[in-house]
Amino acid sequence: MRVVAAVVVAVALVMGGAALRSSGSREADGSLTADEQRSLATLRVVDARHPLLAMTLYAPYDPLRPVVAAPATERPLACSLFLARRGPRGPVFGRNFDWLGNPALLLTTRPPRGPASISLVDISYLGITHAKASRVTRDPVLRRKLLQAAALPFDGMNEHGLTIGLAQIPDAEPPRVPGRPTVGSARIQRLVLDQARTVDEAIAVFGRYNVEFAPGEPALHYLVADARGRSAVVEFVDGRVKVIRGTGSWQGMVNFVLSGAGEDVKRSDDRYRTIAERMRATGGGLSPAGAMDLLAAVAQRHTRWSAVYELHHGTVHVALGRDYHKRYTFSLKDD
């Protein structure tokens, strides 16, 4: 199934809640802290074609601080996600990010306090287009924009093996609880990566914030998993948080609301059916290579990246633009 949405993304998708403001005096005058300089010194080009950059962020960041983000235009959305619990190397989390061919950043965060994490970021939201990406390593203004990328994880995993990813659905109605901070639909993933070790703790993070989908934004739902192989889909239905916990050897999620979905709905979606058939055939026992093969089987023509996270090992394997013969591996154990 291919879902196409005309999306003009307002601030809440990536930042949420608060009005945008200028980046601040240090960014404006070009001065950087020692931690920021150290971070930018790690910036490198991994793949110039697609492109993919990589950087380690050592500088502290405020996960609720508004940053300037560029709007998005029409996007084809059809993401696929799954957890296979019983792999020979432990649980693996697979994710196709189906989007336009924008530049991406593999961001490792090592804050002074809190868990390290590794995530993939679409840096077009920071105003770094495909054309600009070719000069980002030598352009000081573009380089500084990457210091804001921690707020924009589109999928990711922290050092405890807690992993999260998002996908579009036709509609979502989050709760609005007075007194709770309001955050955007990508920002909540950063908060989960920073605050949770387990699926239960991740669900609790969702309960501490109002998640906002501004008018014109895609509605989303989330798959979370942890190193013990537990998983859950988090959705917003009729102003309530709905949690669908995984109960077998796997759990999958594509672009329909799982809350209340019958078997006929699941069988009618080609990608979900393909995931289910492969999982049943293997008993959820996919290796990282097997998980990547399954992502290839459900890829769309606009699949931007395919990522397989190994929850026991702090490792992510990435293929770009459906080029499954060329895969990159990154580890939280690397400095």
Image (tube, rainbow, N blue to C red):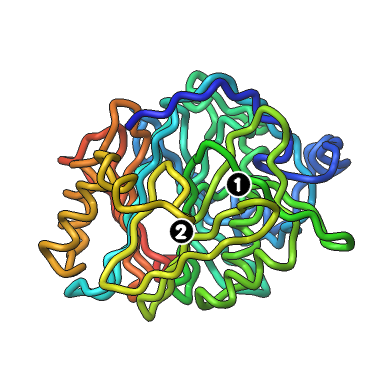
The vertical placement of 285 against 79, above or below, is: below
Left or right of residue 86, residue 318 in this image? right
Left or right of residue 296, residue 173 in this image? right
Residue at position x 76%, y 41% in the image: 67
Residue 170: % across, % down: 52, 36
Q: Is residue 147 visible?
A: no
Q: Dividing the picture into quarters, in which one does residue 85 lie?
A: bottom left
In what quadrant of the picture does the C terminus appear? bottom left
Residue at position x 74%, y 45% in the image: 16
Left or right of residue 285, residue 71 in this image? right
Residue, disc 1: 152
Furthest residue in direction left, as rendered: 281
Residue 97: % across, % down: 40, 40
Residue 284: % across, % down: 21, 68
Report the Cα–Cα distance between label 2 and label 1.
16 Å
For the residue marked with disc 1, what is the amino acid? Leu
Total labels drawn: 2
